[in-house]
Image (spheres, rainbow, N blue to C red):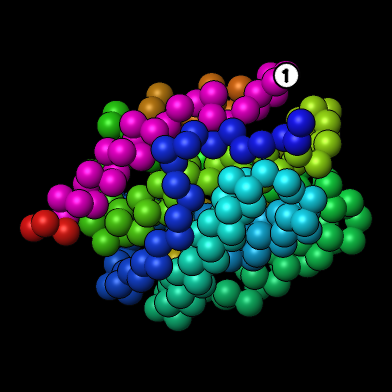
């Protein structure tokens, strides 16, 4: 029997063509008025457009080998969602750099060269394994961001929160698509785990390079107090990376699947919030 989708039947992977008016937010430190917190998320945004193109391409290379109609339909939804994410973060990144004097070419060309090297030296299956790993990272970050106990939410500008929540919700909806395609075409547990180690290293490196560039252009790179606060934001009790550590480690368990973490209640809560905002 052919491998089939393991995304729950009541989770629809449907692209939402959202556009976000965030230019006024990008002029300043939109996350809690804090330069480090803002720069961290801005640096993550810088990585998204090229990363999402890589994800789409890696999944499409295997789409003709998939037999399950449900998974085929979900691949289309995945590509559509990631395409809209890519567009919105391209707009985000261009506006950010225009407004604040960051060097978008420097940041994106470095990423582009790394992806080109990956395409050259990694097999298509290794690229797909990398995509499955990155998708797990983004999904557990999304899960943390939309959780009711997230201590970070109150300090975020509402327009930016809307964009990041939309992105987070769709990351959770399609979190298993690349994973299921990887399993369907015979990807091994060993390669899957190795890919997560590499993905983690390169993602942290890319975000840190972006963070350093943004803080340097802001004239705040050598502010030690700011870095102490930033490290607390990332790693101390309640920090955004510390919060996801248990979920991250689950990826290395034999037989792991992303939907072993059932995030449907978070998705339902987000959808109800959308409905309530439209009703106002």
Q: Of 175 and 70, which appears nearest the observer?
A: 70
Quadrant of the snapshot with the N terminus: top right
Q: Residue at x 54, y 36 (%)?
A: 7
Kindly report the secondary structure that dominates the magenta region of the rendered protein: helix
Tell me if residue 252 comes above or below residue 103 in the rendering. Answer: above
- Neighbourhood count class around disc 1 (C-alpha, 10 Å): few under 14, some 14–19, many 20 upward: few
In the drawing, does residue 197 fall left or right of residue 176? right
Q: Is residue 269 magenta?
A: yes
* Residue furthest to the left: 280
Q: Of 152 and 82, which appears nearest the observer?
A: 82
Q: From which residue to which does the magenta span run? A: 251-277
Residue 70, visible in the rendered structure: yes
Q: Of 107 and 121, which appears nearest the observer?
A: 121
Residue 175 picture location, percent across and down: 55, 42
Q: Residue at x 16, y 55 (%)?
A: 277
Q: Is residue 133 magenta?
A: no
Q: Residue at x 40, y 67 (%)?
A: 17
Residue on which the image places disc 1: 254
Label 1 residue SS: loop
Q: Residue at x 34, y 31 (%)?
A: 265
Residue 54 picture location, percent across and down: 70, 60
Quarter of image, res 238: top left
In the drawing, does residue 101 fall left or right of residue 193? left
Tell me if residue 233 comes above or below residue 32 in the rendering. Answer: above
């Amino acid at each position: 029997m052919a491998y089939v989708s393991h995304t729950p039947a009541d989770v629809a992977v449907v692209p939402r063509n959202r556009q976000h008016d965030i230019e006024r937010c990008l002029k300043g430190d939109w996350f809690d008025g804090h330069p480090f917190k803002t720069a961290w998320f801005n640096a993550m945004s810088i990585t998204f457009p090229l990363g999402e193109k890589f994800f789409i391409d890696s999944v499409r290379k295997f789409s003709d080998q998939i037999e399950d109609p449900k998974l085929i339909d979900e691949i289309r939804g995945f590509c559509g969602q990631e395409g809209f994410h890519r567009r919105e973060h391209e707009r985000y990144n261009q506006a950010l750099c225009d407004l604040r004097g960051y060097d978008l070419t420097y940041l994106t060309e470095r990423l582009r060269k790394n992806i080109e090297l990956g395409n050259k030296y990694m097999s298509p299956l290794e690229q797909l394994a990398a995509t499955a790993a990155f998708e797990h990272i983004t999904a557990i970050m999304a899960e943390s961001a939309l959780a009711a106990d997230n201590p970070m939410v109150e300090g975020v500008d509402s327009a930016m929160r809307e964009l990041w929540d939309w992105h987070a919700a769709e990351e959770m909806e399609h979190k298993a698509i690349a994973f299921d395609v990887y399993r369907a075409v015979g990807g091994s547990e060993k390669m899957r785990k190795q890919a997560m180690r590499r993905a983690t290293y390169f993602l942290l490196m890319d975000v840190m390079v972006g963070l350093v560039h943004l803080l340097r252009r802001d004239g705040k790179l050598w502010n030690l107090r700011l870095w102490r606060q930033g490290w607390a934001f990332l790693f101390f009790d309640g920090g955004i990376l510390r919060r996801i550590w248990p979920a991250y480690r689950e990826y290395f368990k034999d037989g792991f699947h992303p939907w072993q973490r059932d995030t449907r209640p978070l998705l339902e809560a987000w959808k109800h919030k959308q409905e309530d905002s439209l009703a106002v």
